[in-house]
Amino acid sequence: MAGSWTAGAQRRAWLSAALLSVALLIAPLLVWLLLPRPAPVMPAPRGPAPALVAPAQPEHAAPREVEVEPPPPPPPPPPRETTTASAGPIRGVVLDPEGRPAAGATVRCSDEPGLSASADADGRFELPPEADGCTATAAHPPFGDAAPTRVAAGADNALHLIAAGSIAGEVVDPSGRPVDAYLLAIESFVPAGSGAHGRVNGRARKVSDPGGAFQLDDLAPGRYVLTASAAGRPPARSAPIDVEAGRTTRPVRIVLPQGATLRGRVIDAESRAPIVEAQVELDSATSSGANAISLALTDSNGDYELEGVPASGPFSVRVRHELYVAKIVPGLDARGAGSMRADIELRPLGDGGSREELSGIGAMLSLSPGGVTIAGIVEGGPAALAGLVQGDVIVRIDGEPATELPLADCIQRLRGPAGTRVTVGVEREGRVLDVTMQRDVVVR
């Protein structure tokens, strides 16, 4: 009995140990299956870790003025010019107002005047590669200049000329009766539009019409002043006339006043003997050549009679003889009378000496887009001594505006007897300077 009980006890102990071992093996598996899985661990981002503690600051830091430098200016744009490696020639065409090729038109860059070309028989032109991106215009009288156009290599460059206009009018005497024969010319012209370089034919033309009528065609758009003159009637000018493309401006009326007669004697300044066959003629009465007043010759007594000089306002005469120094006599004024007298002395020619003398300020004038401009200065003359320089634009003469005066009027007002004074206002580099000077005899 005792042995049997012992054997049973051993079997139960062994079975308990086996069951405990199995339980120990199964318990972890059940825990892994029943419990939730943890979230995956992500790798930490790279980079500096944030500061955990702010850096210490002084409790009573004094304020500081900090100079903040402005950002550097942007680099300058690259130059407009290109090289033959980056662009070929700039090609295009010039067309007239009807869209036809304008053979012989001149094309130039307004911002690079040295870059120019001529259009061929088909109106085609070719500018060098350096003209890439320039502002070009075309000129071909009688048309108006083409509007400034930016041209580029490889582009369809077309320059369109502007249609011409016309002026129609009449020339009459102070009573309104027509003058049937006269000379007519363009005294001045200012092209329409910015950057324009229109040109006109300023030569005087003879007009013969019972009604005194005239018409000028093929005019480039712009502002014109006309001059007319007839036998016994000194040159007279029109008011400014605006001509538009493709239109006729009418009616334009020019009134020719009756002139006065200038009489006098021309003598040798040294011997006081009369000079025979000296020529006396109006000088600088107009810059267009529309002067129908014939010159006068002195007779055996040295006397002359010049018909058709201005009856009012200053004018000049030029006196010439092959054996004498030519002389310009300025500041003559009939003051509304029918006649006046002026005796003139001439100096004999010397060996290699001067050929002409006049009294004035010693400056040569020309008409420019900016107005009447000093084109040259006589060394040692009043203008030079007063500090006037070439390029000065005349804006005032003796306090009166001169910007609208024709070239011939400015010349007459600056001339005058030696010893008289004149004040001239000139514009130079955006400033206007007034200079008073004393006229003197100038020889050249």
Image (tube, helix red, strand yellow):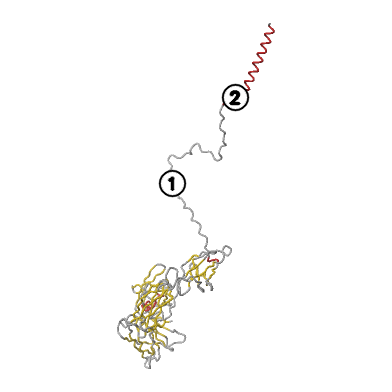
Q: What crowding class fits label 1: few (fewer than 14 Cα within 10 Å), some (14-19), or many (20 or more)?
A: few
**Is 183 on the left or on the right of 108, as rendered?**
left
- The kind of secondary structure element at disc 2 is helix
Residue type marked 1: Arg
Q: Which mark is residue 64?
A: 1
Q: In percent of the image, x 47 and y 38: which residue is there?
A: 56
* Mark 2 touches mark 1? (CB < 8 Å): no
Q: Residue 331 or 232: which is nearer the viewer? A: 232
Q: Residue 353 or 105: which is nearer the viewer? A: 105
- The kind of secondary structure element at disc 1 is loop
Alpha-carbon span between mark 2 and mark 1: 70 Å
Residue 345 is drawn in which quadrant? Answer: bottom left
Q: Residue 292 or 420: which is nearer the viewer? A: 292
Q: Quadrant of the C terminus?
A: bottom left
Residue 306 is drawn in which quadrant? Answer: bottom left
Residue 220 is drawn in which quadrant? Answer: bottom left
For label 2, the residue is 30
